[in-house]
Amino acid sequence: MALCAAWTIGALHGQIAVRKQGYVPYYDEPIHYLSDDLNDPIARLQKRLNTGQANLDWEPNGGYLRSLLENLRIPISSQTLVFSKTSFQYKRISPETPRALYFNDDVYVGYVKDGRVLEVVSFDPVQGGIFYLLDAQKRDHPAFKRAELDCTQCHIAAGTRGIPGVLLRSVYPTSTGTQAILSHSYITGQESPLKERWGGWYVTGTHGKQAHMGNAIVRDSEFPEVLDTIASTNLSGLAGRFDRTAYLSNQSDIVAHLVLGHQTQMHNLITLTNYQTRIALYNEAQQGATGEAAANSARQVYQKPAEELLRYLLFTNEAMLDDAAHGSSGFQHEFEALGPRDRKGRSLRDFDLRTRIFRYPCSYLIYSEDWDSLPEPARDYLYHRLHEVLTGQDTSADFARIRKGDRKAILEILLDTKPGLPPEWRQTYKQKLRAQSMLERTLSTLSTN
């Protein structure tokens, strides 16, 4: 699941490890992962709570959950439900008591019925995923506690590309929510075929004839990778599967699932490119290297993750849909309404959901603080490469799936909506305006004649 088996309880003391207990990768320069200098959404919310500019209201059902989502502007429609035991609160998770996950562009919130804490991953523009816990019990002054050591046991791994990040797991679940013995599991990203997605998750909405692993459990332990496919049909809701009153919604929207599958690994790739660039520049400085040779040496380090990020940004490895998908919670409408939109009314948040997730294959996270906070050399490199692809200068096989019309549309959308584009992009914009003006004059002359 997106928060994996995070915040694992210590076997001896039953305590959740918090800051600076044991070794955490990236502790030293230049990353300083455990630094207090944070500007992620939870750090900002905590400052508002401390000064009385914000409040968290507690409810008997859900504790601080609803109020937290409101403060972070996370829609309830983003709810996805996972019933596999992939959290340190695993004893309270089952098909009858699934774990709920809510998210926006920057934050992931995990809720377990009768759980001890709310689990949060909040993305700092510089440091990437920061892990927090919020006590579920009512407090006079609720406060987020940063938890790192146990989180990084799962959240710095191959599935997160080696940095503190987030991931989705798909497993073959038993009737209790445990992963079936001797069965495979999958890390979900936008390249994952639907047939390998959502094992151990509930999925609502419609997906036509496409098969996935959601809503199903293993019936025969001798054949752990044969699921009860009857349960994996199109569902409009989850009535009767669990106690609806303990949750904010009875939906686990397929569109939210699709967005989540893209977004988690996009976050990880941005963080990876950030870290690798900072490390490369730091190493060059420590060695006293200067000049073009030093710059080229550093570029060779961050170019590889940057190129991977570029391809993921443009969905070049996306697993295509074989049938149309439709959501069930209103998530699609709320997500699209966030914009921004260009002068033609187009947005990178517009969905397709017939053959692919989005109408225009370029990630909306290009608008994020994480993207804007990439170290300048990597950011400049990515913008230059993106410009080459969108203007048709790069016609390599890696980008062959991006149609000419889509390249043109993405370029126009970004020129209208993305602040801070480099000069070569602005030059393209001026050339576009001149071409439009010449066309309009030509049409005007033809009409008068």
Image: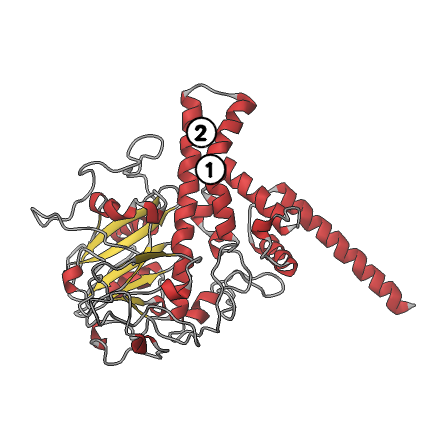
For image coordinates 30% across by 38% down, the residue present is: 33
Residue on which disc 2 sits: 281
**Based on the displayed image, in which of its 4 quarters is residue 411 positioned?**
bottom right
**Disc 1 element:** loop
Percent across and percent down for residue 437 are 77, 57
Above or below for 144 versus 440: above
Left or right, 405 with respect to 209, comes to right
Left or right, 394 with respect to 25, comes to right
Indicate which disc residue 267 carries: none
Indicate which disc residue 375 carries: 1
Q: Label 2 sits on what residue type?
A: Leu
Mark 1, Cα crowd under 10 Å, few <14 / some 14-19 / many 20+, is some
* In front of the other: 448 or 195: 195
**Based on the displayed image, in which of its 4 quarters is residue 70 positioned?**
bottom left
Q: Label 1 sits on what residue type?
A: Pro
For image coordinates 54% across by 59% down, the residue present is: 361
